[in-house]
Each structure stands twice: as structure tokens, then as C-alpha cells.
Amino acid sequence: MTKIPTLPRKHLFDLPEGVIYLDGNSLGPLPKGVAARAAEVITAEWGGQLIRGWNASGWMDQPGRVGDMLGRLIGATKGSVVLGDTLSIKVFQALAAALALRPDRRVILSDSGNFPSDLYMAEGLVRLRDAGFTLRVVAPEAVAGAIDDSVAVVMLTEVDYRTGRRHDMAALTRAAHGAGAVMVWDLAHSAGAVDVDLAASGCEFAVGCTYKYLNGGPGAPAFIYIRPDLQGVAQPFLSGWLGHEAPFAFDPTYRPAPNIERMRVGTPPVVQMSMLETALSVWEGVEMADIRAASVALCDQFIAKVEARCPELTLISPRNAAQRGSQVSFAYQNGYAAMQALIARGVIGDFRAPDVMRFGITPLYIDAADVTAAVAIMGEVMEHRLWDRPEHHAAQKVT
Ligand SMILES: *Cc1c(COP(=O)(O)O)cnc(C)c1O
């Protein structure tokens, strides 16, 4: 079979004119065909089929079907991923099920690089259980050393949302298992960004969202993975009817489905799920290893050019690509205003308090010419202090 040149695939996206989009780590852009698919689901399926759509258009099986499409991108075996709800909910489900696998232990170990919602969900679960559980949060570099036999669950996000620092998934999973702990990985900044091999890692649970590197659109459903041997064991504590073994038996007592379907909760968001299904078609024929190689090359190029052109910015992402995801972050005291000035000139990244300018590098639709053009604009903004205008300092709700 001849290999089709796969990257970039800009022609598969509706990107606005005059924009270099370096924020696909936060909200992926619109793939072509998604809007038409949403309209078709609304008009032909919902409008035309009404309740019959659940069977006739396969709405009911969609969470697992899309799970398999996505699973290929994260090294999950067929039938081990299901979609639904938001990532915060999936974190709660994974963590609750993970804790139940180690009933004699009381510590959840995480790190300060984790996304706040993951830590908040853990805090809520600790309060709910009211049984002496603690959430222990250490620095990312200290995680390996903090895993001991008091730890029930190690819960980590592989790629840090601020710095792009990437944990060693295989090594930390081995360390967790060596101490008898259960491993939960959050792949929010990994799925579609880096080459993840869930099956090889041996982790028990993984979760992630689909509106970042997977381009499912704002509010796209999240996913959860359970290692195949645990699918009949892991307990679904958000025991909604669609995770039941036989939802349409309307049994008054709950019996979990024997497979990954047990992590479903309630009615799936059909329109949004259909948008995601179409969005995932842009990955057809793309190997994550090729995405990763292109991402590393583009990130290295971006770092070298920015450091040469914008000496005011300090790299806070790891310089070593092996320890980095698919984003590059720089610290700059006036980072908020500088990012606003860049956005006004068509270079869209984002800002995280107190001083982090984030740039997502997404080889599906970003290439070397985009990197060069973006850095030229960054250079102008920095050299001439174009950020130092009142309109760029005005604070907005979402940064
Ligand atoms: C983006 C992100 C979230 C967001 O959770 P939602 O429930 O989808 O809003 C949670 N955790 C991590 C690690 C993230 O990167």
C-alpha cells in the first residue's frame, strides 16, 4: 500500500481567513462537514424520524461506536472506550471506581500541575465518602517519590495544561502498580496531541475531553476508558439507566452492563455526539506517530524562533521534546495584554494566570509556514510594545 501524505489537512477544516490558530489545545477548530451533519441530524433525523431516530439512526449505540473511533487514537482496544457527559463527570466516575478497587486504602495522590477541576472533583468525592480519605497533592516532579502503599489511586493528567510538561505514563503507571495502587490518567491534553498507548501502559482507567485536540466543538462529550479485564468489575457509582444491563427492562434495581457501557449515565447528547463523529473522520488514515513527529518538529521550530525574536519571553515548557506535549508556553509579565494584541492581529493563543502565554501546535492544520508567520507577528508586537494599549489590557471573562 502506498502511503498517502497525511499532514497537514487544512483543507478538511473551516478556518477563518487571516487567522493562525494556535489554540487547538483549548478548543479545536471546525472540521468541514460538521455543520452540515448537525443540520442533518436536527432536520432529517430528529425532525423526520422523531423517536424512531434512536434505532433508525443508531443514536443509542453511538457512544460506543464513537468510542471505538477515538480509541484507535489513544491505543485502546475495541470496546474499551465510551463517550458521554463532561470530563469533570468522567473524572469523578473513574476516581470513584478506582477507589472501590482498593477498599483498604485512603489516599488519592495527584499533582499541583493537574487541572483544577480534576482536583475539585476529588475533593468532592472525599467529602461525599466521609470515610477518612485524603487528597494528597505534590509537585509534578515529586509524584514518583510520593507513591507508597498508603496510596489507593494515583490520578494524573499526562500533559500539564499550563506548561505542556508531559509525564512518563508508562513509568508512573509501573510505579503505581508496584505499590499496589490503581492508576487513572487524564488525557485531556493528550488525545489527538501525542502518541498514547493506553493498552501498553496497563493503566486501569483513563478519561479525556474531545473539544480540544479532537475538534468536537464546544461542549463535546468526554470519554472514559476501562482496562478490558476490569470492565465487569469497575463499579459505576453514577448508576444511571443507560449504564444498566437492560435499560429498556425498566427494572427497579440497578444492574450494571457487563462492559464499558456501564459508564454511560443518561441520555447522550445526540447532536453534539454526531458532530464529534464527523469531526473524528479528519483522522482517517492519520497515524498518531506521524502527528507526534510533526508536532515535535513544529514545537522545536517555534521555540527556536520565538527565543531568537522575542527575548522578553521566557520558555516554561520543557525544552526536551520527550517531556513535552503539543503546546508551548512562555511566561511574560504582560502576557495577558500581549496575547490580546496577538489575537487582534490574527494569531490566536490564550493566557493562563498569572503570566502564561500558551500556544497549541496542531499538525493537522498548522504547518511550518504558519509558525514562521506567527512568530513574525509576535516579534512586531513585542519589539514595538504593541500590547501596551488600553484595549489590550481590558479583562475578559474567558482568557
Ligand atoms: C479541559 C480540562 C477539563 C475540563 O473539564 P470539563 O468538565 O470538560 O469542563 C478537565 N480536566 C482537564 C485535565 C482538562 O484539561
Image (cartoon, helix red, strand yellow):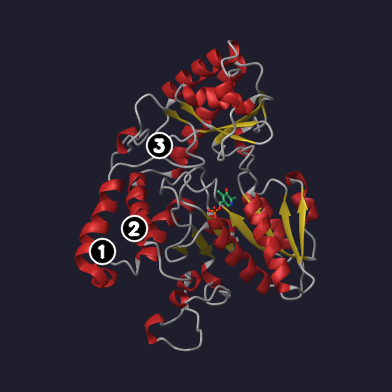
Label drawn at residue 46: 1
Label drawn at residue 364: 3
- The three-letter code of the residue at mark 3 reads Leu
Q: Badges 1 and 2: C-beta atoms under 8 Å apart?
A: yes
Q: CA distance from mark 1 to mark 2?
A: 9 Å
Q: Position of residue 311 (x, y in %)?
A: 65, 16
Give the quadrant of residue 146.
bottom right
Q: Residue at x 55, y 51 (%)?
A: 187
Residue reaching furthest bottom?
A: 252
Q: Quadrant of the C terminus?
A: top right
Give the quadrant of residue 165.
top right
Q: Is 397 placed left or right of 7 in the picture?
A: right
Determine crowd level at label 3: few under 14, some 14-19, many 20+ residues with C-alpha closer than 10 A.
many
- Mark 3, secondary structure of its residue: loop
- The three-letter code of the residue at mark 2 reads Val
Going from the N terminus, do you reach mark 2 or mark 3 first? 2
Q: Badges 3 and 1: C-beta atoms under 8 Å apart?
A: no
- Mark 2, secondary structure of its residue: helix
Q: Position of residue 265 (x, y in %)?
A: 48, 71
Query: Residue at label 2?
Result: 271
